[in-house]
Every structure is written in C-alpha cells, then in structure tokens.
Image (cartoon, rainbow, N blue to C red):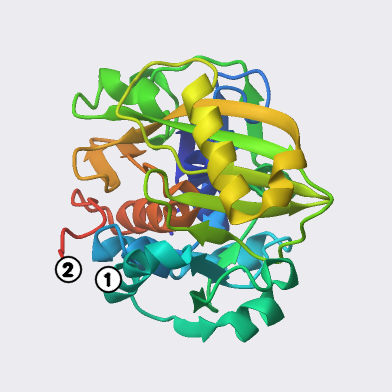
Amino acid sequence: MKRHSVTVIGAGVAGLCCALELAERGARVEVVERGRALGEGSCSWQAGGMLAPWCERATTDVSVAESGAPSIDWWSRHFPGTVRNGSLVLAQPRDSADLTRFAQRTERFDWIDADRIAELEPDLAGRYRRALFFADEAHLDPRRAMAALVERLADRGVAIRFAVELSPDAAPGDAVVDCRGLAARDALSDLRGVRGEMVVVRCRDVMLARPVRMLHPRIPLYVVPRGNGLFLIGATMIESEQRGTVSVRSAVELLNAAYALHPAFGEAEIVELGADLRPAFADNLPRVRREGRVFRANGLFRHGFLLAPALARQVADALEMETDDANIPERRRA
C-alpha cells in the first residue's frame, strides 16, 4: 500500500478494525473518538460478541456468512481471548419444529442427541432431546477484544484521541474513514437505528462453555458465557430509535427466556442492564461508500464483531486499489 495518511473517525469495533487493518498494511493512521473513553456511547460495548456466521445464516442474507466466516481467524490472530468452542442451538421439545426449520436454512452443523448435549454442556443434561451443534463457530468478550485492538494499535504507533468531535470533511489526511455509526446520518440519510437490549447476570449455579441459542416462541434467546459466572443474555431487536435504559417488558422477557433455558437463572444476580441503537440500512447489510477521500463504513446492524473485519478489509482494499467502487457485501441472495 502507498503510505497514505488516514484519519479514522469512531473507535467502535468498526473504527478499530479499520484502523488496525490500514496500519498493518502500512498506512499512517490516527483515530479520533467523540466519547471520553473506550466504549462510551458505542453500541459495540453492548454486543454479544458471537462469531457465528452459520447460525446467522439461518436468518440473514447469505453474504453475512460468507463475509463473516473469515472473521473467526481474524479475531483469533488479533485477540487471544477468542474462544473457538462452537455454538449450540436448541429448543424445548414443544418447539422442535422451529429447530428443524432453523436447520433447513443453514449449514455446517451436526444434529446431536441428548447424550451429546450433556457431553458438551453438562448443566443442560436431561433438559433437551436434540440440538444443532456448530462446531466451527466462536465467541469473545467485546470489551476485552476492543481493549486488545487498542493495545495493538498502540504497538504500531497509532494514537486514539478521545473527546474529539470532528467532521469527516474537515479531518486531515489523504483519506478519512467515517465509522461514526448513527452519528453519520448527516451523510447517510438511509441509515436507521435498531434498538437492542441486553442483561448481564452472575449465576454460580450454571456453567456453559459456549454460546447457547434457544429458539423461543416469542423471543429467541442467546446466552453467552463471559467467565467468572457472568453471562450476557440478549436477543431483542426493536424497530425504534428511542434511546434509554432497558424497558421492564424487555427485561422480563429476556429473564423469562433465560429461566426457560435453565431454572437456575431464576436465582441469578443482575449485574448490568444495557440498551443501545445499532446502525442499519434497509436490508440490514453493511456498506462502504466512497465520496472523494471519505470512506463511509457503516450499517453493521447486529453483526458488528462478525462483519467488522470484512468491512475493514474492504476499506483497505479500496484505498489500496484507488477504486471508487467499495460497496460491501455483494448483494447476493440465498
């Protein structure tokens, strides 16, 4: 790569991945972030951290899996805390038809029986008759992963300036990468916010080695282990741009679904409730749009950690090749 000077605006997962990819290819990079500290005001801070391209394949465009699958290796190289234990998808016996429909829409999984479920997750023994096991998937702790990217950037001499409001048009450098999320609606009029809510609980009576998704009639649930008895419980996607704390209804539905997964969650301690808005375009697929020297990388929706490395590669490739056509992913439908 020509030794470009690049300003990256935004230190969420998209901005950090773009900055690191560019720095690794030889660019001189600076990151500016309007928040006062890492994670402040960023929906990345509330993410589940599941690197689950084939689970997502069941409910999204095929391009999400195709673009996201290489991210597992990318994160494993850049964040040693990436856990490659696979993902488990299950349902209550009365909802077994939902499990079959889920399986029909995806790939790279094994049907497993109750004995294999008990082998993988002993604390779920005897509770479920069959499940889908996606052995090649992974997960990570988003907050630790973002901190690790900051350290890697520092090792390459990339500074991050916090509490800085900067317009992309006014930013210095040969190129500017706009990773402001919803704040970029001043330039991306078709961007919308999708509200997501999560609960972090501490439960000493349940051990899980991998993310578990339960296909629930009203609210499909995922539970992601964070270590030390901590679990992130999430699933909500609300077509609302209202910010604020988690609603009572959402908290009740998330906790009820977790209780249905395992009754021990009924005795869990609530550690954190969080809500934020995910930036998304109409088809819930990300874009990189180039306007002169400004690259607008946005629209990761609920696939931030899964698709941010692909978004970063696309930005770096477009800058390297001096191309004006940087849109990703290609609009191919299943």
Amino acid type indicated by mark 1: Arg
Residue 79 screen position, x and y as percent: 68, 59
- Residue 15 x %, y %: 50, 40
Q: How many numbered discs sit on the rendered protein?
A: 2
Kindly identify the amino acid type of the residue bearing the numbered disc 2: Ala
Residue 293 appears in the figure: yes
Q: Secondary structure at mark 2?
A: loop
Horizontal relation, residue 37 to residue 326: left or right:
right
Q: What separation in Å lies between label 2 and label 1 (alpha carbons)?
A: 9 Å
Q: Residue at x 42, y 55 (%)?
A: 307
Task: Quickly name the residue at label 1.
Answer: 105
**Label 2 Cα neighbours within 10 Å, binned few <14 / some 14-19 / many ≥20:** few
- Is residue 197 left or right of 326 when viewed as pictured? right
Q: Is residue 204 above or below residue 313?
A: above
When the figure is inspected, residue 129 is found, relative to residue 38, above or below; the finding is below
The answer to whether marks 2 and 1 mark residues whose Cβ atoms lie closer than 8 Å is yes
The image quarter containing residue 85 is bottom right
Q: Earlier in the sequence, mark 2 or mark 1?
A: 1
User: In front: 116, or 96?
Assistant: 96
Front-lying residue, 70 or 96? 96
Q: Determine which residue is flagged by label 2.
A: 334
Tell me the quarter of the image containing the N terminus: bottom left
Q: Is residue 26 visible?
A: no
Residue under the image location 46 percent in, 84 percent down: 110
Q: What percent of the width, then of the height, locates residue 75?
A: 59, 62
| Classed neighbour count for the residue bearing mark 1: other residues with Cα under 10 Å, few (<14), some (14–19), many (≥20) | some
* Numbered disc 1: secondary structure: loop
Rendered location of residue 40, percent (x, y): 61, 23
